[in-house]
Image (tube, helix red, strand yellow):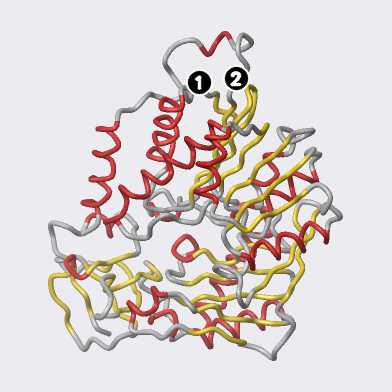
Amino acid sequence: MTKVFLKKKIQNRVLQGHPWVFGNEVGEIDGPVNAGDIVDVHTHQGFFVGRGYINPQSQILVRILTRDKDEQVNAAFFHHRLLKAWEYRKKLGYVENCRLVFGEADEMPALVIDKFNDYFVLQTLALGMDKWKGAIIDALNAIFSPKGIYERNDVPVRELEGLPQQKGFLSAPFNTDIILNENGLKFHVDIVNGQKTGYFLDQQDNRRAIQHIVKDADVLEAFCYTGTFSCHAGHYGAKSVLGLDISEHAVNTARRNAELNNLQDICKFQAVNAFDVLKQWTRDEKKFDVVILDPPAFTKSRENIQKAITGYKEINLRGMKLLKPGGFLVTASCTNLVPPSLFLEIIDMAAKDAKKKLRQVTFQTQAQDHPILWNIENTTYLKFLIVRYPEPGRDHTEQGPSAIQSAPVSFIKIQTLWRHLISSVP
């Protein structure tokens, strides 16, 4: 088997458990290099580190699958890994709908599998994983006997691996408009044309977190997509809910979701540019009891982190200004290049500019079926925050210059953080 030897001075990150080996971390390679092949990774001294797949076309030269020298990567390997991932989800209570495989966090880098009832949506985002797609499908059929499997490999990142973008059935064709159950509600899942795999399972736990704050409230949800937070708000007793999204298709699905749950009289939706509306309604001094902000990722590139920071600050500043005294801001970020500490600091900056004193209610990450590994930063990608804008004269503990109950931060500190992010990847 081909051996990949790490450079002495920059091998610690991989030795400490990160599964990615970048090209500039490799000193020499002993043996042929064929894209997608399984190779062994060794220290500069020749000690075994792990076994994974290689792709010289990718910036990530090797993705490690196992650190067990005796474990072979074959069809049985993927069957065992999938079974292990499923047993873990079942122990946490994610049985009907879940992210069955969350890439690196499940020791299967560049593989994503979502389970919607008896249907599965699969993404193989790297060449080495794509070569094992047949074995993965066989394992899904053996473990679950699913009603259908679909691939959503229509993502640009595959092109960096020399792979085409594609989507289609990996089983006999089936009706791809699926209805799933979540927190007592039903939602349409368009696995062919919906974003990512068709539905955002990562917020399913967080949607329950708004249960008490929306009761009898006027709620605004910007970037509502298919209205899942909006429908939860209506279900939990909101007086009125207005969802905004730029996609007419998403808004039509949101209306269908409201009707599916008999919430069409409470939950209304508009296909508009949420950025423009938030700005205009701030000028108009519109007010809501609860403002929910769940935008798409603002950047996937380190070069644009500063723009993402500006964007998050802008929408949260507008959201705060639309709150009534005593209101709640529910805000999220799925940009994995913005770590939790930086996200909180952005909110703190927005609060200072909005002259709002905020009290943190809860701060959470993605649902537990998207496991987090502390040594792999991008597994902690979703940030979900609820803060309250106190009523004047009632929250005497909120005296002083502080906003969120965390250390105040300067813009210089934010600049330092994102510069560190840029320089931290080899």
Question: Where does the image place residue 320, in percent across and percent down from the top left?
Answer: 53, 32
Badge 2 amino acid: Pro
Residue positioned 79% across, 60% down in the render: 186
Above-or-below relation of 157 to 236:
below
Above-or-below relation of 44 to 55:
above
Q: Name the residue under label 1.
A: 357
Task: Name which quarter of the figure residue 324 lies in.
Answer: top right
For marks 2 and 1 on the same chain, the one whose residue lies earlier in the sequence: 1
Question: Where does the image place residue 191, in percent across and percent down from the top left?
Answer: 64, 74
Marker disc for residue 301: none
Residue positioned 40% across, 71% down in the render: 65
Task: Name which quarter of the figure residue 2 lies in.
Answer: bottom left
* Label 2 secondary element: loop
Q: Check contact, mark 2 vs mark 1: CB within 8 A.
A: yes
Which quarter of the image is occupied by the N terminus?
bottom left
* Label 1 secondary element: loop
Residue positioned 81% across, 39% down in the render: 237
Above-or-below relation of 59 to 410:
below
